[in-house]
Amino acid sequence: MDLGFNWLLIQLNSLNSPQCLAQSLQVPYFAWQPLWVVLIAIFYSKYDTRRTHSVRTAALHDGFSARLRTLLLQEDLEVCSDWVEAKLPPLPGAAGTSVTNLSCVTRVTIPGNVSLCCTWLPGQGAPEDTRYFLFYRYETHTEECPAYTKDKWNRNIECRFSRTQIKPGEIDKLIVIHINGSSQGAAIKPFQQLFNQNAIEKVNIPRNISISLQQNDLLAMWEKPISPFHEECFEYEFYLINLKSGNKQILRIPSNSFRVRVDVGSRFSIRVRANHNLLCRARGLWSDWTETIYVALPPDLPTCPTQQTCKIHSDGKNKVGLP
Ligand SMILES: *[C@@H]1O[C@H](CO)[C@@H](O)[C@H](O)[C@H]1NC(C)=O
Ligand SMILES: *[C@@H]1O[C@H](CO)[C@@H](O)[C@H](O)[C@H]1NC(C)=O
Ligand SMILES: *[C@@H]1O[C@H](CO)[C@@H](O)[C@H](O)[C@H]1NC(C)=O
Ligand SMILES: *[C@@H]1O[C@H](CO)[C@@H](O)[C@H](O)[C@H]1NC(C)=O
């Protein structure tokens, strides 16, 4: 399907080809060939390549332009051709009809698929009868949204894919979102935005929190969230409220356990949430907090024998206390 993800072709003509430069310097082209570099400037980002083609993913709704020149490098010598330029026009449509405030979130689901949810606002200039359509593209796969949520004028403002072709274990791949629309009253201008898949992943919650008492320390342990990434790839925030003193703390924990000194008669509430640390890939969005676990230690706290763990029982309602 063509989403206007067009190719931009820039031809180097004979006046700015490396061969021409080599000839004007009166050296055989073959001697120079490994040394030329093609410089490409897209918007304001500039990069070098030794190839004669280059693929970059970019949003095209506002048009696009790229410039290219050849650079010949040999020892102290550096010669450049002129720039050549190519442009794609902006995608057609009336001003103010594009969606705004697009935001997307992915999640790794239990069977290891990735779901995608996007929300947006209709453009200020979009007529009430506007219908928006959302597509995502990942690698070469393009798909239209199967399920929309509508606003009070029946305009689509949210889309959910319960599964996508997004690969949960990939790092820094781009998800392209394209939203176009139709209306009797105006031509709706399409909108495109690129998202780094890691940056918009909402991490799953940590699992199976268990609480035990070791000597006079409360020990909380949990398992990493559902994810293709290993345990070392996560960090946690531990939200501890001392219900007696009202003292609240959010602690950043690099591993999946936490120990805190407790006194007889203390009462706590505990919640944990997870994110990727930077060891394996970029951070995503923090997971939701786990459900609150309440811990109440009786005033006659039995002394736990040294080096032994006293299990604290749970009554199944997120409340734990010593038996
Ligand atoms: C929206 O884009 C899709 C994919 O390019 C295209 O098939 C469809 O016709 C477009 N719809 C409108 C209303 O422009
Ligand atoms: C939409 O985005 C604009 C600019 O980024 C912001 O000022 C505005 O508060 C956002 N609106 C909503 C409803 O989020
Ligand atoms: C995603 O779901 C589909 C259908 O439910 C399944 O065939 C596929 O194997 C799943 N993908 C992964 C990576 O588990
Ligand atoms: C986590 O808890 C669930 C349900 O209590 C259990 O089925 C699962 O085996 C536990 N996971 C591990 C790795 O112990």
Image (cartoon, rainbow, N blue to C red):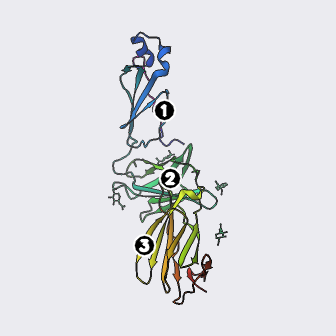
Amino acid residing under circle 2 = Asn
197 relative to 24, above or below: below
Q: In the rendered image, is residue 88 in sight?
A: no
Q: In the rendered image, is residue 110 in sight?
A: yes
Amino acid residing under circle 3 = Gln
Give the Cα distance between marks 1 and 3.
50 Å
Give the Cα distance between marks 2 and 1.
24 Å
Q: Is residue 111 magenta?
A: no
Near-viewer residue (276 or 39): 276
Near-viewer residue (38 or 272): 272
Decide: few, some or many residues near mark 3? Use Cα within 10 Å; few <14, some 14-19, many ≥20. Answer: few
Near-viewer residue (104 or 97): 104
Residue under pointer 2: 198
Q: Are the two marked residues, 3 and 2, in contact with CB atoms closer than 8 angstroms?
A: no
Label 2: element kind: loop
Q: Where is residue 132 drawn, in percent x and y? A: 45, 54
Amino acid residing under circle 1 = Ser
Residue under pointer 1: 54
Farthest residue to the front: give it: 306
Q: Where is residue 161 drawn, in percent x and y? A: 55, 57
Give the Cα distance between marks 3 and 2.
28 Å
Please provide the residue range marked out in magenta: 6-15
Q: Where is residue 188 drawn, in percent x and y? A: 40, 49
Residue occupying image coordinates x 41% and y 75%: 248
Instruction: Look at discs 3 and 2 and give the one toward the viewer.
Output: 3
Residue 131: quarter of image: bottom left
Q: Where is residue 109 drawn, in percent x and y? A: 59, 60
Residue under pointer 3: 249
Label 2 CB-ligand 3 distance < 8 A? no
Quadrant location, ligand no. 4: bottom right
Residue occupying image coordinates x 47% and y 14%: 29
Total count of labels: 3
